[in-house]
Image: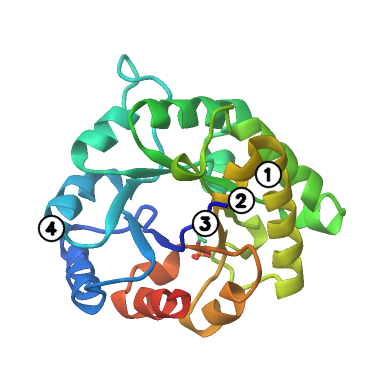
Amino acid sequence: MTTPRKLAAGNWKMNGLEAQLAEVDTLMATHTTPVCDILLCPPATLIDRMARRIGDGKIAVGGQDCHAAPSGAHTGDVSAAMLADAGATHVILGHSERRADHGESDDAVRDKVAAAWEAGLVPVVCVGETLEQREGGSTLAVVGGQLQGSIPDGATAATLVVAYEPVWAIGTGRVPTTEQIAEVHDFLRDRLSQRMGGEGNGVSLLYGGSVKPSNAAEIFAVENVNGALVGGASLKAGDFSGIIDALE
Ligand code: PEP
């Protein structure tokens, strides 16, 4: 049986100029032989510089989105092949901010996942309910639909990471109870196993939404939580380090 890899992933969102890369130096110095995988997803402008700075270091670099097409007349967009060419190994897809700000549908995310695979990138596919959907009792229906619709057939444990990110917990300081996290992660694991067989048991399932050093250990103790996708707390090496330590 495939065991999911532990992964601490940072999403810098639209934050970071050159000077921000000093945080990466600190992280590398602190985690020379990490026992979990570490991924940083800076804005596209920093991918190449971050990847070069890391060199043979133990931190992977990812994009925050990609276009579904390999190239073409799509002003302002970046393709999966371009991310890979810049040094990325992963790409976040279907983040709720992309779904909300850019109207990305499950179909659009699915096409991007296929493009990521084509370019050799591992997609970190995000699913999560709004507060209204949770209060309306449709959390599992929502995340189940997003999972089914956003991931093409053919995924393996090595080519897919899934992040459960309740929209109402992102950047708000509000965190679901461990029971709520467990319910969704168990559900996602079941769905992945139904669809992918044994491979589904090996997919890393991340929790994301206001993860901090102070709550990370409690979240990581939940079964079927294999790591975190971290926004705000990934911008400071000290904070992100505390989360990595809790995962190790
Ligand atoms: C995110 O943007 O994916 C996220 C989880 O943000 P934060 O950790 O800031 O809530």
Q: Estimate the spatial distance between the alpha carbons at disc 1 and disc 4, rounded to whole Å.
A: 38 Å
Q: Is residue 246 above or below residue 127?
A: below
Which amino acid is tagged 4?
Answer: Arg
Q: Disc 3 marks which residue?
A: 4
Q: Are marks 2 and 1 in contact (CB under 8 Å)?
A: yes
Q: Earlier in the sequence, mark 1 or mark 3?
A: 3
Mark pair 2, 3: CA separation:
7 Å
Tell me if I can see residue 177 in this picture: no
**Residue at screen point 62% across, 44% down:** 198
Q: Is mark 4 within 8 Å of ligand 1?
A: no
The residue labelled by disc 1 is 193
Q: Return the residue at label 4.
A: 53
User: Which badge, 4 or 2, is on the more N-terminal residue?
Assistant: 4
Which label is found at residue 201? Answer: 2
Q: Amino acid at mark 3?
A: Pro
Q: Earlier in the sequence, mark 2 or mark 1?
A: 1
For the point 76% across and 62% down, the residue is: 183
Amino acid type at circle 1 is Ser
Say whether residue 151 is left or right of residue 56: right
Within 10 angstroms of label 1, few (less than 14), some, or many (20 or more) residues? some
- Write the residue at 52% across / 35% down: 102
Vertical placement of 75 versus 36: above or below?
above
Q: Residue furthest top?
A: 73
Whether residue 95 sits left or right of residue 105 in the image: it is: left
State if disc 3 and disc 1 touch (CB < 8 Å).
no
Question: Circle 4 — which element?
Answer: helix
Q: Nearer the viewer, residue 99 or 178?
A: 178
Kindly indicate whether the residue at mark 3 contacts the one at mark 2 (C-beta within 8 angstroms).
yes
In this orientation, which residue lies closer to the viewer: 147 or 100? 147
Mark 2 is surrounded, within 10 Å at the Cα level, by few (under 14), some (14 to 19) or many (20 or more) other residues, namely: many
Helix, strand or loop under label 1: helix
